[in-house]
Amino acid sequence: MRKNLKEARQKAGMTQKQVAEYLGISERYYKFMESGQTTGNVKLWDKLEDLFNVHQRFLREIHHDKEDSQ
Protein backbone atom coordinates (compact mmCIF):
# COMPACT_ATOMS: atom_id res chain seq x y z
CA MET A 1 0.00 0.00 0.00
CA ARG A 2 1.14 3.53 -0.72
CA LYS A 3 0.49 4.84 2.77
CA ASN A 4 2.05 8.25 2.04
CA LEU A 5 -0.19 8.80 -0.96
CA LYS A 6 -3.29 7.86 1.01
CA GLU A 7 -2.29 10.11 3.91
CA ALA A 8 -1.58 13.05 1.57
CA ARG A 9 -5.00 12.61 -0.02
CA GLN A 10 -6.73 12.44 3.35
CA LYS A 11 -4.78 15.44 4.65
CA ALA A 12 -6.01 17.38 1.61
CA GLY A 13 -9.58 16.36 2.52
CA MET A 14 -10.11 14.63 -0.81
CA THR A 15 -11.80 11.37 -1.73
CA GLN A 16 -10.32 8.85 -4.13
CA LYS A 17 -13.01 9.85 -6.61
CA GLN A 18 -12.04 13.54 -6.42
CA VAL A 19 -8.36 12.76 -6.99
CA ALA A 20 -9.21 10.48 -9.91
CA GLU A 21 -11.32 13.23 -11.49
CA TYR A 22 -8.47 15.72 -11.02
CA LEU A 23 -6.09 13.29 -12.73
CA GLY A 24 -8.56 12.46 -15.51
CA ILE A 25 -8.56 8.73 -14.73
CA SER A 26 -11.10 6.28 -13.37
CA GLU A 27 -11.58 5.93 -9.65
CA ARG A 28 -10.73 2.25 -9.98
CA TYR A 29 -7.37 3.03 -11.59
CA TYR A 30 -6.57 5.54 -8.85
CA LYS A 31 -7.45 2.94 -6.22
CA PHE A 32 -4.99 0.58 -7.88
CA MET A 33 -2.32 3.28 -7.72
CA GLU A 34 -2.99 3.98 -4.06
CA SER A 35 -2.96 0.28 -3.18
CA GLY A 36 0.31 -0.26 -5.08
CA GLN A 37 -1.26 -2.63 -7.63
CA THR A 38 -0.18 -0.41 -10.54
CA THR A 39 2.61 2.09 -10.94
CA GLY A 40 0.80 4.78 -12.91
CA ASN A 41 2.74 6.99 -15.29
CA VAL A 42 5.09 9.91 -14.73
CA LYS A 43 2.52 12.52 -15.79
CA LEU A 44 0.08 11.28 -13.14
CA TRP A 45 2.76 11.38 -10.44
CA ASP A 46 3.74 14.90 -11.53
CA LYS A 47 0.12 15.98 -11.09
CA LEU A 48 -0.11 14.30 -7.68
CA GLU A 49 3.10 16.00 -6.61
CA ASP A 50 1.61 19.38 -7.59
CA LEU A 51 -1.77 18.62 -6.02
CA PHE A 52 -0.44 17.54 -2.64
CA ASN A 53 2.78 19.58 -2.66
CA VAL A 54 4.71 16.44 -1.73
CA HIS A 55 7.62 14.96 -3.69
CA GLN A 56 6.47 12.04 -5.81
CA ARG A 57 9.28 9.77 -4.56
CA PHE A 58 7.70 10.03 -1.12
CA LEU A 59 4.19 9.49 -2.48
CA ARG A 60 5.27 6.45 -4.51
CA GLU A 61 6.80 4.53 -1.59
CA ILE A 62 5.12 1.21 -0.98
CA HIS A 63 4.69 0.08 2.61
CA HIS A 64 4.15 -3.59 3.25
CA ASP A 65 1.79 -4.50 6.06
CA LYS A 66 2.84 -7.22 8.45
CA GLU A 67 -0.04 -9.32 7.16
CA ASP A 68 1.18 -8.99 3.55
CA SER A 69 4.54 -10.55 4.35
CA GLN A 70 3.12 -13.67 6.02
Image (cartoon, grey):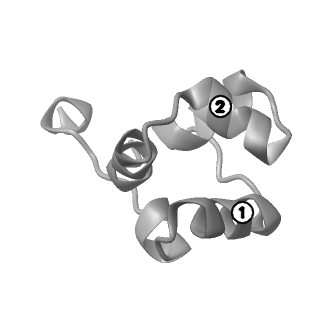
Query: Badge 1: how crowded within 10 Å, few (<14), some, or many (20+)?
Result: some
Residue 48 at what x, y percent from top left? 63, 59
Query: Badge 2: how crowded within 10 Å, few (<14), some, or many (20+)?
Result: some
Residue 42 at what x, y percent from top left? 76, 68
- The quarter of the image holding the N terminus is top left
Vertical position of residue 13 compared to residue 43: above or below: above
- Give the Cα separation between the discs numbered 1 and 2: 13 Å
Sequence-wise first label, 1 or 2: 2
Identity of the residue furthest to the right in this view = 24
Q: Is residue 45 left or right of residue 37?
A: right
- The residue at the point 81 percent across, 66 percent down is 43
Residue 34 at what x, y percent from top left? 51, 40
Residue 40 at what x, y percent from top left? 72, 52
Give the residue at mark 2. Answer: 18
Q: Is residue 42 left or right of residue 63?
A: right
- The residue at the point 61 percent across, 33 percent down is 32
Q: Which mark, residue 16?
A: none
The disc labelled 1 sits on which kind of residue? Answer: Lys
Mark 2 lies on a secondary structure that is helix
Vertical position of residue 25 compared to residue 55: above or below: above
For the residues bearing labels 1 and 2, Cβ distance under 8 angstroms: no
The disc labelled 2 sits on which kind of residue? Answer: Gln
- The residue at the point 46 percent across, 71 percent down is 54
Give the residue at mark 1. Answer: 47
Identity of the residue furthest to the front in this view = 13
- The quarter of the image holding the C terminus is top left
- The residue at the point 51 percent across, 70 percent down is 53
In the foreground, 22 or 58: 22
